[in-house]
Amino acid sequence: MTTTAERPRTTTAGSDFSELQRRINAAGLLRRRPAYYAVRLGLVAAALIGGWTAFFVIGASWWTLLVAVFLAVVFAQVALVAHDLAHRQVFRTNKPSARAGRIAGNLAIGMSYGYWMDKHTKHHANPNHDDLDPDVGPGVLVWSREAARGKGFLTRYQAYFFFPLLTLLGLSLKRDSIRALRDGTVKQRRLEAGLLAAHLIFYVSALLLVLNPVQALVFFVVHHALFGIYLGLTFAPNHKGMPHPDGTEDYLRKQVLTSRNVRGGWLVDTALGGLNYQIEHHLFPAMPTPNLRKAQPIVQAYCREIGVPYELTGLAESYAQGLRHLHDVGAELRGR
């Protein structure tokens, strides 16, 4: 539901974020949460080690498909941890953040931390901008009617293909990671390539040495398909179907108007890694995840005060809005 103030407070647009930042600072919500991250990183690491331990203990059995499902969830949680590391929510400085990020991204799940960080930084700078946000640039899925013109069958009915295509997301990100390393666009290229190779060697060797070829293939498909779906469902509710800015908005409006928050309790917070507080995260990227819930009522009340729409909806409705937008983008191609 979008809420707008009936009588907006009189301020200049340039001062709006400064006032909000003052209120957030006064509440102490930008302070680090080392105990929280020590527990979270420890639990995720234990789950990752436990998953692979179960894989080797169970051995050449179809029961290992349950491990594939479990590891798909764990890989997505590792990716969410890497996201927080990239935003310096865990460590204050870049060096320890990058070291831990490369271990989580490159070594643990086989995705380039440097590639993803560069891509995600551009997204945060210009969310939903048709030309500047790589997350909405024309690809397999198209997010604007202008980009859809001249496209074919897939774009015409892309809303129906959304969930099936998510099964390929994890592999797509890994492919793009390798391309970025090959093209030399990633810092610490040799280190990242070495960690990525170590992950690949371990993963392929484990599957081929423990499972028979058919089991290995099915494990790989189940694991990466569910990993892609989970990862996609984590990020999809955040901006899809929200307005695309023209570049004239001030910082606060650019971040708030393009983002959507998702209601939910601790289960949704855990499953989405705190990204269900997307508005607060975009306004304060370095804010630790557990503080986003506390910041939400402050930000929502402030937006109401200055007359800025604040989008808050349920999880299912957030997906529905994104799918409706995808379907609408292809309307001209369907002759409607």
Image (cartoon, rainbow, N blue to C red):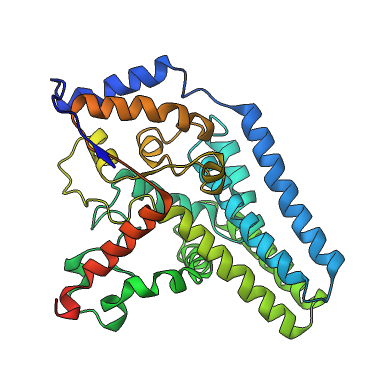
Which residue is at the front of the view, 317 or 254? 317
Indicate whether 244 appears above or below 264: below
Image position, residue 329 (x, y; %): 22, 68
Left or right: where does residue 285 sit relative to residue 103? Answer: left
Residue 233 picture location, percent across and down:
47, 58
Q: Please state if 226 lies on the left or on the right of 137 as rendered.
A: right
- In the drawing, does residue 239 fall left or right of residue 150? right
Question: Which quadrant of the figure has residue 60?
Answer: bottom right
The answer to whether residue 157 of the structure is visible from this angle is yes
Q: Quadrant of residue 259?
A: top left
Q: Quarter holding the N terminus?
A: top left
The image quadrant where one finds the C terminus is: bottom left
- Does residue 94 lie above or below 247 as drawn? above
* Residue 31 image point, x, y percent: 51, 22
Relative to 219, is 290 above or below?
above
Residue 140 appears in the figure: no
Q: Where does residue 27 sit, x and y in percent of width and height?
A: 43, 17
Left or right: residue 325 versus residue 96 is left
